[in-house]
Amino acid sequence: MRMNRGLWSAVVFVLVAGHVQAADEEVTMKGEVVEVSCYSKRGVEKGTGPAHVACAIECAKQGKVLGLLTDGDGLFKLIGEFAENNNAKLIPFIGKQVVVTGTLDRYTDYTVAVKPVKITVSK
């Protein structure tokens, strides 16, 4: 049985939304800052890591969405002040393992997002 794209998206949304804390609750997460569309199209092997940083930076400068790819919890779009001005405050973190402290929210397409208040490179 094949599931249509809309139904599949709804199932994934419910599973992810049920797994995370409520919106506006402060969270601290660890992961890699990635460019969302490249990661979605190319996957982990070709859409993450040092080999993809230059491409991701170019996309970020065009205002494309960046996200935090975490182990186990998935991909969280990064929104708010850090994403303003074509991701100016996020660009230095692309391709790096970071710790993000912020609040959970929803992106304009209702996917899970985080609004960072602090980002540091993970040690």
Image (cartoon, rainbow, N blue to C red):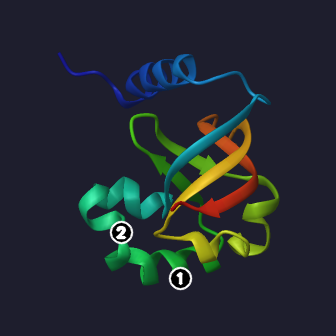
In the shown orientation, is residue 36 left or right of residue 99?
left
Q: Which of marks 2 and 1 precedes in the sequence?
A: 2
Local crowd size for mark 2, using a 10 Å CA cut-off: few (<14), some (14–19), many (≥20): some
**Which corner quadrant of the image does residue 27 belong to?**
top right
Give the mark toward the camera: 1 or 2.
Answer: 2
Name the outermost residue toward the front. Answer: 123
Q: What element carries label 2?
A: loop
Q: Which residue is drawn at 70% across and 46% down?
A: 101
Q: Does 10 sit above or below residue 98?
A: above
Local crowd size for mark 1, using a 10 Å CA cut-off: few (<14), some (14–19), many (≥20): few
Residue 108 placement (x, y as % from top left): 70, 43
Closer to the camera, 28 or 68?
28
Given the image, on which type of amino acid does mark 2 rest?
Gly
Q: Does 34 sit above or below residue 15?
A: below
Residue 106 placement (x, y as % from top left): 69, 36
In the shown orientation, is residue 4 left or right of residue 57?
left
Q: Would you name the residue on which mark 2 appears?
A: 49
Q: Which residue is drawn at 27% across and 66% down?
A: 46
Closer to the camera, 47 or 121?
121
Alpha-carbon span between mark 1 and mark 2 = 15 Å
Closer to the camera, 114 or 111?
114
Q: Does 29 sit above or below residue 33?
A: above
Q: Is mark 1 on a helix, strand or loop?
A: helix
Q: Which residue is drawn at 64% across and 51% down?
A: 100
Residue 79 placement (x, y as % from top left): 72, 52
Q: Would you name the residue on which mark 1 appears?
A: 58
Residue 96 placement (x, y as % from top left): 48, 67
Given the image, on which type of amino acid does mark 1 rest?
Glu
